[in-house]
Image (tube, helix red, strand yellow):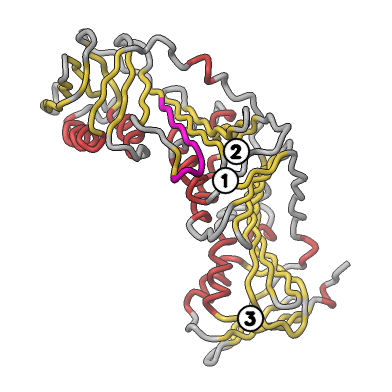
Amino acid sequence: MITAQEVAMKFSIAQTEFLDALQVVSSAVPSRTTLPVLSNILLEVSEDKVEMRATDLDLAIATKARANVKDPGTLTVPAKKLFELVRKLPKEELKIEAKDLTLNVGSKSGRYKFLCIRPEEFPVLPKVEADVEVSLEPDLLERLIRRTIYSVSTDETRPALNGALFQIRDDELRVVATDGHRLSKASCKPQGGIPTPPKGDVIVPLKALNQVQRLLALAAGPVSVGISKNHARFTIGDTTLTTKLIEGPFPNYEQVLPKQNNKHLKVKREDLAQALERVSVFSDSLTRQVKLSLRPNRLTLIVQTPDQGDATEELDAQYGSDDLDIGYNAAYLLDILRTIDSEDVDIRLNTPVTAGLIAPTAQTDKGGASKEDLLCLVMPLRLAS
């Protein structure tokens, strides 16, 4: 076991390399904690690299940076102060030296000393023995998360909805989120397939999804997603994010998907989004209600708010069913439209009080690689008679 007297390390590292790695792990450091060591980053120096780890006990991020190592060692360093200092130092080689519980950072013009905490006080990060491992292209995983994350509930009284369901069925990975008013389901069949016999339902917390999305911007190759009973692990290059899962059960979303929605409205996605942006200026600040008035090959958006004024826009559309007036929260519709890539959207409706389904009109293979599918559900708002 390492003792305070034995702590020693010595290495040099490029400021840019150090800063990039610190930026990656710092987002796992909790802003408030009763455990002082959680405000620190664990530095583990060996051979030609520095491994860095940070955790809030629910989520952990670990990454590596190249370094010129003279003496290996391990120490925890105050995260915020170290990041702030390195960010403000010039782009040059930094000399780092630790003795006992102090860490010295040297640049050409300055020397800075940090008071540290013994490394053995830092929590041991969970080792995820994955029951299933899936390899995904980073842009594919980014789309799966981006197309569902807005539907995750922030209502802490319903913890199972505070994350997205990762579900594996029949060689398909599905990501589903709902807050009770809307639901989004994005799915894909990865090009490399999914190893059998996987059949798993796990709920990944919103915080982890936000962090994975941020890390995916740095990904240069396929991302490995490992799922065990209690944890999920996302490996993105030299960076690994591990998160505790939310205990379920997640609602049976397939039961709430309406089967009778045979009134199809096809409309230009961008035209609808822009019109919604304009008319919703006049909507009620709480309900954001907009009325969709459907007539043969015509869609009219109507907002009437007694104390705000009113707005009307007409759009060309393909619609051949009975006349229908239905109310929606404009913000919910816009959230959906922003995640759809196709030129047109297909909105499937039934009655003014049943959920509507929205999907891209053309769902084809992305470059022949992975078949993707997107379906969004949104509950209507009751219109004043």
Q: Is 32 placed above or below 130 here? A: below
Amino acid bearing label 1: Ala
Q: Where is residue 69 in the image (x, y as percent from the top left)?
A: 72, 82
Kindly state the secondary structure of the residue where label 3 is placed: strand
Point out residue 107 in the picture as x, y percentages from the top left corner.
56, 88
Q: Does the magenta stretch include residue 371?
A: yes
**In the image, which is nearer the foreground, mark 1 or mark 3?**
1
Span of residues in magenta? 367-376
2 and 1 marks in contact (CB < 8 Å): yes
Residue bearing the label numbered 2: 204
Q: Name the residue under label 3.
A: 113
- The image quarter containing residue 191 is top right
Nearest to the observer: residue 209 or residue 1: 209
Quadrant that contains the C terminus: top left
- For the N terminus, give its image quadrant: bottom right
Q: Which residue is drawn at 16% across and 14% down?
A: 295
Question: Looking at this rendering, what residue extends furthest in the bottom direction?
Answer: 108
